[in-house]
Image: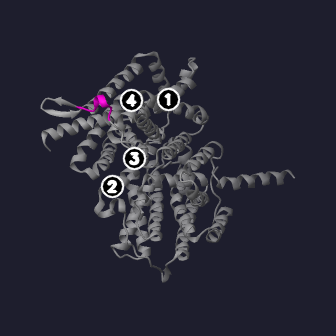
Amino acid sequence: MSAQLLLFQVLNGTGIGMIYFLLSVGLTLIFGLLRFVNFAHGAFYMAAAYIAYAVAVWTGTFWWALVLGPLLVAALALVVERTLLRHTYALPHESQILITFAVALIIQEGIILLFSPLGHNVPVPEALSGIVFLGPYVYPAYRLAVVGAAVLVGVVLWVAIERTRLGSILRAGSESAEMVGLLGINVDRVFMATFALGAALAGLAGVLAAPLRGVEPFMSSEALGIAFVVVVVGGLGTLSGALVGGLLIGLIQSLMSTLWPEGAQLMIYAAMALVILLRPAGLLGRL
Amino acid sequence: MRDMPRFPDLSSAVVLAGLAVLPFLVPVTLAVQIAIFATGTLSVTLLLGSIGLLSFGQGLYLGLGAYAGGLLLRDAGLGLVPSLVVATLAAAALAGLLGSVIVRRHGVYFVMLTLAFAQMGHFATLAFKDVTGGENGLSGLPRRFDLFGLPIEGPLSLYGLSAGAFLLVFLLVQRLVASPFGSVLAAIRENEPRCAVLGYPVARYKTAALALAGGIAGLAGALHVVFLGFVPPSDADLEMSQRLLVMALIGGVGSPGGALAGAAFYMIVSEALSEIWPRWMALIALLLIGLVLFLPGGLWSVGGRIAALRHREAARG
């Protein structure tokens, strides 16, 4: 592998990894507080990618999608939480998993109904369609912008969780939701907001990924699998776990796709199996 | 308590009657598929019903059974019964191996790992094209088989084979749940930490249940390729895992009879609706939500509820 190709793949892997980070950090936030895994997470990601596609087709610009994708998906998540999930908090966690799984199926079928089962390309936004010179090498501008956007969101999230009142409610809630409720905080509303925020992050990941990989109705289960791998590798419940896991998986996928294209996806899962064998709690997790 | 009564009982009688009338109610080829998927569904039912493990990945073992069965029948020239047995054992071995890794994690990690390993299996079939045929699958399987001297050829004999296999597995699961082993599984389902404190090797019990369930799914996969005459790559798909889970939930996991009810319902509905509205899965998803919220015992529990109601009325009158 030449130096140029290696650099190219490392940058690609970082970009993909940052998208995986955004995807998984939403899953982690929801789990941290609500203690269940959102099986509709991949479907939220896909829904936003399709919103990006629709916006690009109808308006000719990508920028509205960056706002609309996460917002509409968050609204969808609010509806799901208010109408369905709210009634299952007293039931075993399996119930919430199965409800979100059913929601994922409905979203997937709905998208096939609206957009046909075939895949579509999403154009890279015009302002970022060029290339950037990195010393002697060239690199697509959009991929660099994705890394920048994800870093920005990551920093904002970190500050929001570690340094604000809302963040302290979230952290306290993930230790003991009951205790936070006794302190006079409306836990019900915190649950609702967290679920919507997690979905919005999956939505942002979906919008950013759309120009890189296009859209197709089966990207949701792929994304769900990847998000699970990331949180298993990194450790569930922490920002840093999602970051480390996301970057690691992105790099493995990107480097393997030059060495063994058919096996690139397989190696992601092999890496996960290795991590569980060596460190069952994940790289940064506590058992 | 969800423990099952000992054989012979009402539920095995209902299952037996159901298997007997099924090929007269629906086209025989559909009945064959119902029996095969009911067998696969039993692996989900066993895990979720007896030990409380939610698996999104039983399709992996069904897929392994399908590929193993296909390769043994086509390339190794093994007979029908040895192929089915070896495919079952291979799936059980993989399930036991992965299971011993997966049971190191609890609760929500367990669920995620079952899905992740199922995805791994799917991508493995794509990565090793030379063995699996990639997206084309494996074709050219023999179409005539010999079952202890009986020819297996054509839908009705295939139904006999698959219904027989289902009945065998059904009785095995039913006996197992009623056995001391099954009592430990139920205890783990109800209170895992207490079982561990009492000295039961919980991880080993879980691994054993996973291996058993994997073997059952593998048998279903091998039967599926015997029926189809080829190995479709969709057998190792994540969607297969989801389908088995959905069938199990529709039928209800409180009794192994639920697997037959769920598979029959799902296959008949898909047959009836897929021509009219290809997006019928959305309706199944709505049904799933309704079941989780209002009827967690699934279709099979309806009979029990009616019986209990009549019992109460009889007692009153």
Considering only order in the chain, which callout, 3 or 4, is on the residue closer to the N terminus?
3
Q: What mark, if any, has residue B124 been given in the picture? A: 2
Which is closer to the viewer, label 2 or label 1? 1
Location of mark 4 (residue): A238
The residue stretch that appears in magenta: A124-130
Q: What mark, if any, has residue A196 been given in the picture? A: 1
* Picture residue at 25% right of the left edge, 31% below the top: A141
Question: Which chain does the residue under circle 2 lie in?
Answer: B
Count neighbours of disc 3 (C-alpha within 10 A) and say few if under 14, some if 14 to 19, many if 20 or more: some
Instruction: Specify whether disc 3 shares its chain with disc 1.
Output: yes
Image spot of residue B285 (x, y percent): 56, 47
Distance from the alpha carbon under mark 3 to that under mark 2: 23 Å
Distance from the alpha carbon under mark 4 to that under mark 3: 34 Å
Please state which amino acid type lies under the numbered disc 1. Ala
Considering only order in the chain, which callout, 4 or 1, is on the residue closer to the N terminus?
1
Q: Which type of secondary structure does the marked residue at label 4 adopt? A: loop
Location of mark 3 (residue): A119
Image spot of residue A276 (x, y percent): 34, 43
Please state which amino acid type lies under the numbered disc 2. Ala
Distance from the alpha carbon under mark 2 to that under mark 1: 35 Å
Count neighbours of disc 4 (C-alpha within 10 A) and say few if under 14, some if 14 to 19, many if 20 or more: some
* Picture residue at 42% right of the left edge, 42% below the top: A224
Question: Which chain does the residue under circle 1 lie in?
Answer: A
Please state which amino acid type lies under the numbered disc 4. Thr
Question: Could you tell me if the residues under marks 3 and 1 are in contact, i.e. CB atoms within 8 Å?
Answer: no
Distance from the alpha carbon under mark 1 to that under mark 4: 18 Å
